[in-house]
């Protein structure tokens, strides 16, 4: 157990009761002050970020990794705009969303309240420090941050800045804490602190999230991995299907809601697959195919069984021909990661069957898998996309970081 | 890893997709058939239950333990009535509870769907076998049961009966499974099967639940322990306060929503504590007190620090005098188990402060702590009372065993 972590977790827990009593006005003021302090410290942010960048170069991190660490004016602007936007979002804290009267006169109500202490363990990108805290503060929560070692200087500085601005504007002291150690022990300690942490949200690669999920004694919301399929039905509009597959796969291949596998009904394979091959090959897509579709892709490798489970975050795309909608549904429910699944069809009954049968956070009918996103849904900035079933499913924003408590108004009722 | 558990978990998982497609009509028919098969097999149930009772006597279990195992006609009737009542409850499965249109024309909706596979690990009472399955089936889920060794013969027989009735009426094969082994290994295996089990609900003593929570890789909903306080404010109606404390403590001391500790404002201690002592002592209550209240209870022992955290499931009652509402709130938030907390006061501002500040599943104003219960809330039979914050808080019934999935209706939209 890491004493720094325990100490900070206690501080955050104790701040959580005070944070829950802030008003909406208070929170808006706090978030805007956080934005302002970033704006006033651009040069310092960039200077401190340089340390992480230099360290990264010294350690021969890839260009892509180094790019993720970078904080330039554009990215600082995005953090600032993000905080202002979160400040303006609607929240339901304190609302009594239902209240009913019992035969004995008791009024039973459900009041929206913060979750309390949210711990976020994240990798690389330093902007997560600000974005995550913004959503947590907006939803009445306090935060314990534990960022990755690559961005630790930037993370600590950003957390200190926004914490200072928050506290100067009424946020309880200790309500935003960042763990300065980046060793494995600090993570292990967080995973054990059920008495201080209400929810843990890991953000990072699939392996990392799996490790956290499997070892945490604190309730975790699993976010992330998207082994998303697009199924092209025999009744699909094939031009639309081509656009949706292209958009799903190519527009941003490295993200969770990108299309990773395409299933094609056997009756339209002859027409559709050659077109798809032509268009996607030009974009650099590499196909991995099943036995049946092999003759449309003579150069492609066969997909090994275990890769049907994998989330390709690169230009690889799986292709499979299915006999019918049932095979498509069974295949998806077996191999998917419960993120986003899409069907392309004009047939209403087929679509409803797919929608009702698929087990995933989002099921799309004639829409790109890429839409699973808080902003695209219109619910605002998100802290992650939940792929588990309890608490919240899909993009998690301000409302998903709250819970309810029953409030019971009586006039002396006793139980008989 | 226990092969029986893995095999059954796989079967249940595969049945879950089919169970999700049943209609409301189907589920009502299944639940009523389950009730009927119990009614038609009363003698067999009682005969098999005898085995457990004899075993219990042989093992010198306490009278109270043996009573918990007993299935007589009254208890069989309760299971039957319970199933009929659950059949009639409202569910929201398949409802699209919200749907909104985005600027690009996408319709984004949230559809209520079952959680999927619910595993229930429970101790002693065999009626849990039927009650739990009833609520799970009503909410579209499938169930993996693992009951305690004391009632294993009754549990297996009940599960086989209701599973038979369910399958004969359209419930998917393997949708209700019971683990026949009752060793520790079968529990340990369940805790690891994240790929097959969506949620795990442990039911039993505090120690047992703690063990499950701390070791499970499957998402758990923590139910149970209730270290509930009743705070008597200086502005309380003292007659009402006396009734509420009496009811909270004495009506059924062995349950989670009973009052375990009483906090009394110093200004009314002189009047209230002697009256409370007199009335509760007659009922057999044993007081454990803080320093300040000691002179009202000269015979009572002082409460050791660690017992402020404990859920007294017997006639013990903790008593503490507080300086003001703030001390009451701080004490409760420090020591409570997030179950139910009550305030007795006529003062509106004090009550609101308490309601807003207390962190618990239920906060009662002028009402007995004993009301935290699905039936008393009017939401129907419950599968447990959640004391954690994520997913569901307080009594969990049919609606709390569902989740949502996003359904997105498009006309070919792609992300830009």
Image (cartoon, coloured by chain):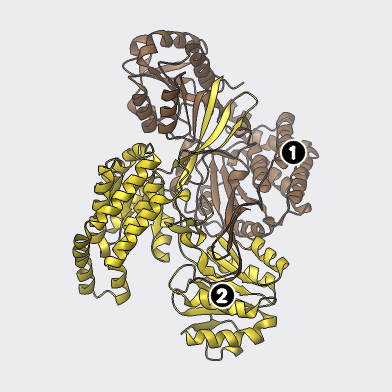
Chain colours: A yellow, B brown
* Residue linked to disc 2: A244
Farthest residue, direction right: B40
Q: Residues within 10 Å of mark 1 (few under 14, many from 20)?
A: many
Q: Quadrant of residue A203?
A: bottom left
Q: Is residue B256 visible?
A: no
Pair 2/1: label in front? 2
Q: Quadrant of residue B152?
A: top right
Q: CA distance from mark 2 to mark 1?
A: 48 Å
Left or right, A352 with reference to A40: right
State the SS at label 1.
helix
Residue contact at pointers 2 and 1, CB within 8 angstroms: no
Whole-percent x, y for residue B28 in the image: 75, 46
Q: Quadrant of residue B397?
A: top right
Q: Nearer the viewer, residue A299 or B415?
A: B415
Chain designation of label 2: A
Chain designation of label 1: B
State the SS at label 2.
helix
Residue A172 to residue B98: above or below: above
Q: Is residue B105 visible?
A: yes
Q: Nearer the viewer, residue A373 or B246?
A: A373
Residue at the spot 55% in from the left edge and 75% down from the top edge: A261
* Residue linked to disc 1: B84
Q: Residues within 10 Å of mark 2 (few under 14, many from 20)?
A: many
Residue at the spot 49% in from the left edge and 39% down from the top edge: A95
Residue at the spot 64% in from the left edge and 51% down from the top edge: B141
Whole-percent x, y for residue A226 in the image: 49, 67
Residue A129 to residue B401: above or below: below
Left or right, B147 with reference to A165: right
């Amino acid at each position: 157990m890491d004493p720094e972590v325990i100490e900070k977790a206690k501080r955050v827990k104790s701040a959580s009761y005070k944070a829950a009593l802030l008003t909406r006005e208070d929170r808006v003021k706090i978030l805007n002050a956080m934005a302002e302090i970033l704006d006033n410290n651009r040069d310092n942010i960039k200077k401190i970020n340089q340390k992480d960048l230099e360290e990264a170069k010294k350690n021969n991190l890839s260009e892509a990794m180094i790019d993720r660490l970078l904080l330039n004016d554009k990215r600082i602007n995005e953090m600032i705009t993000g905080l202002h936007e979160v400040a303006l979002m609607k929240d339901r804290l304190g609302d009594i969303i239902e209240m009913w009267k019992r035969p004995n006169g008791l009024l039973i109500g459900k009041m929206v309240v913060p979750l309390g202490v949210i711990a976020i363990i994240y990798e690389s990108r330093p902007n997560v420090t600000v974005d995550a805290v913004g959503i947590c503060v907006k939803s009445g929560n306090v935060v314990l941050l534990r960022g990755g070692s690559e961005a630790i200087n930037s993370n600590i500085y950003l957390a200190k800045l926004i914490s200072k601005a928050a506290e100067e504007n009424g946020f309880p002291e200790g309500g935003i804490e960042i763990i300065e150690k980046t060793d494995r022990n600090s993570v292990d300690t967080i995973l054990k602190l059920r008495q201080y942490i209400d929810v843990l949200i890991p953000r990072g690669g699939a392996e990392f999230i799996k490790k956290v999920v499997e070892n945490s004694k604190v309730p975790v919301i699993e976010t992330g991995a998207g082994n998303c399929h697009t199924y092209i039905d025999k009744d699909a509009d094939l031009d639309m299907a081509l656009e949706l597959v292209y958009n799903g796969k190519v527009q941003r291949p490295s993200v969770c809601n990108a299309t990773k596998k395409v299933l094609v009904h056997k009756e339209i394979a002859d027409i559709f697959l050659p077109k798809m091959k032509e268009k996607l090959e030009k974009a650099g897509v590499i196909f991995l195919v099943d036995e049946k579709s092999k003759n449309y892709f003579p150069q492609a490798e066969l997909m090994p069984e275990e890769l049907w489970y994998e989330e390709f975050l690169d230009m690889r795309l799986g292709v499979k021909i299915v006999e019918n909608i049932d095979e498509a549904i069974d295949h998806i429910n077996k191999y998917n990661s419960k993120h986003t699944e899409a069907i392309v069809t004009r047939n209403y009954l087929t679509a409803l069957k797919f929608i009702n049968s698929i087990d995933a956070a989002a099921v799309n009918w004639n829409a790109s898998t890429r839409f699973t996103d808080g902003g695209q849904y219109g619910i605002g900035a998100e802290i992650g996309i939940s792929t588990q079933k309890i608490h919240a499913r899909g993009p998690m924003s301000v409302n998903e970081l709250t819970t309810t408590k029953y409030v019971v108004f009586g006039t002396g009722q006793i139980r008989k």
